[in-house]
Image: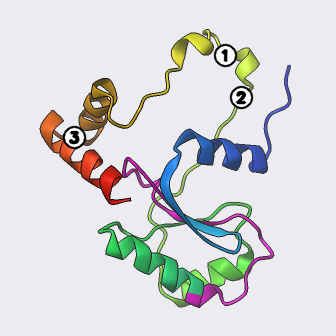
Amino acid sequence: MATAPGAAEIETANLKARPAVETVRDGAWLASYPWDRTKRATLIQSLAPLDIDDAAARIGRLAGLNRRRSLPPIFRITPFAGPLIETALDTMAWSRCEESLTLVRGLDEAPFDIGASFRRFAPTDKDWIKAQGALHRLGFAETYRYHYRRGQDQ
């Protein structure tokens, strides 16, 4: 039986699973903007618990980037967000919106052939656009215009 991945491996996998079109870094903090707009993907997070200097200003700056993109600012608290970051968020009157629990298991224990279930799509691939439209309940043309325009604007 394989050892379950730790927090660093989970965060690395999360960041690689949804490659961002744009990533804004501020020290070990980041705001990522992938092609899709899921809450888990378009968020702000710290990747180092000791990188806490000027937390309130950094939170404000990165939250402003989300607002300029018409995205709600969401700060993801992980084991890498030090307690002073949570204190800063509380002081700034941020509220908890959705707590989640991450469950993991070794891929070598998966009951299916992982290689056969994976396909990398180009952002302009029609099958990818259809899947994104279904996820966001948008029509093909609307999804294509949204993703194509964003891709060209970057």
2 or 1: tag closer to the N-terminus: 2
Q: Are marks 2 and 1 in contact (CB under 8 Å)?
A: yes
Residue receiving disc 1: 110
Which amino acid type is marked by label 2? Arg
Q: Which one is in front in this view, the residue at disc 2 or the one at disc 3?
A: 3
Which amino acid type is marked by label 3? Tyr
Helix, strand, or loop for circle 3? Answer: helix
Q: Which mark is drawn over residue 105?
A: 2
- Viewer-proximal residue, 31 or 90? 31
* Rendered-image quadrant of the C terminus: bottom left
User: Whole-Å distance between the Cαs marked 3 and 1?
Assistant: 34 Å
**Horizontal placement of 124 versus 46: left or right?**
left
Span highlighted in magenta in the image: 33-57
Location of residue 67 in the rendering, given as x and y in whole percent from the top left corner: 35, 75
* Rendered-image quadrant of the N terminus: top right
Residue receiving disc 3: 144
Exactly how many numbered labels are in the figure? Answer: 3
Above/below status of 40 relative to 52: above
Location of residue 28 in the rendering, given as x and y in whole percent from the top left corner: 71, 69
